[in-house]
Amino acid sequence: MPNNLSTMKSIAQARAKFAWECASKYNSLETDSEEDKKRKKKAKDEYSAIVDKVPTYIKTNGLLNTLAFLYSKKGSGKNGEVLKNIREWLTHS
């Protein structure tokens, strides 16, 4: 069982690292103009709001229904970007 537990920890660590990398692209605000900072902050807030809700959506509706919902909303806001990140994790892991 220790091997299984260490494997689960490794997967969780890799998933956390990937999520951090996806979200960190919004953190480079120091060299931007004020307008770019506002735009990036708004995008970061929108992305964060969606990402915060995804685990609840998955638990309530299931993974496929959550992915279908994000796909249906991909043209509005950051839903498409969240969907892209989830698909990238699932296909490259």
Image (cartoon, rainbow, N blue to C red):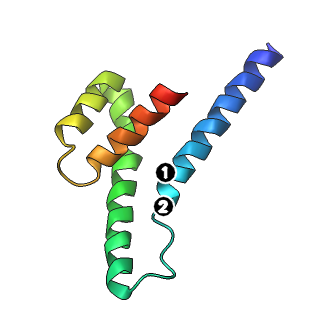
Q: Is residue 21 left or right of residue 79?
A: right
Quadrant in which the N terminus is drawn: top right
- Say what amino acid the circle numbered 2 marks: Lys
Q: Is residue 55 left or right of residue 11?
A: left
Residue 91 lies, in percent from the top left, at: 46, 26
| Vertical placement of residue 36 versus 3, above or below | below
Residue 38 lies, in percent from the top left, at: 34, 78
| Vertical placement of residue 85 versus 3, above or below | below
Looking at the image, which is closer to me, 35 or 12? 35
Crowd band around label 2 with a 10 angstrom C-alpha radius: few (<14), some (14–19), many (20+) = few
Crowd band around label 1 with a 10 angstrom C-alpha radius: few (<14), some (14–19), many (20+) = few
The residue drawn where x is 47% and y is 76% is 29
* CA gap, disc 1 and disc 2: 6 Å
- Quickly name the residue at label 1: 22
Residue 21 lies, in percent from the top left, at: 55, 52
The residue drawn where x is 33% and y is 28% is 60
Residue 73 lies, in percent from the top left, at: 19, 42
The residue drawn where x is 71% and y is 30% is 9
Quadrant in which the C terminus is drawn: top right
Query: SS at mark 2?
Result: loop
Looking at the image, which is closer to me, 86 or 63? 86
The residue lying furthest to the top in this view is 1
- Quickly name the residue at label 2: 25
Tag 1 near tag 2, CB within 8 Å:
yes
| Vertical placement of residue 30 versus 64, above or below | below
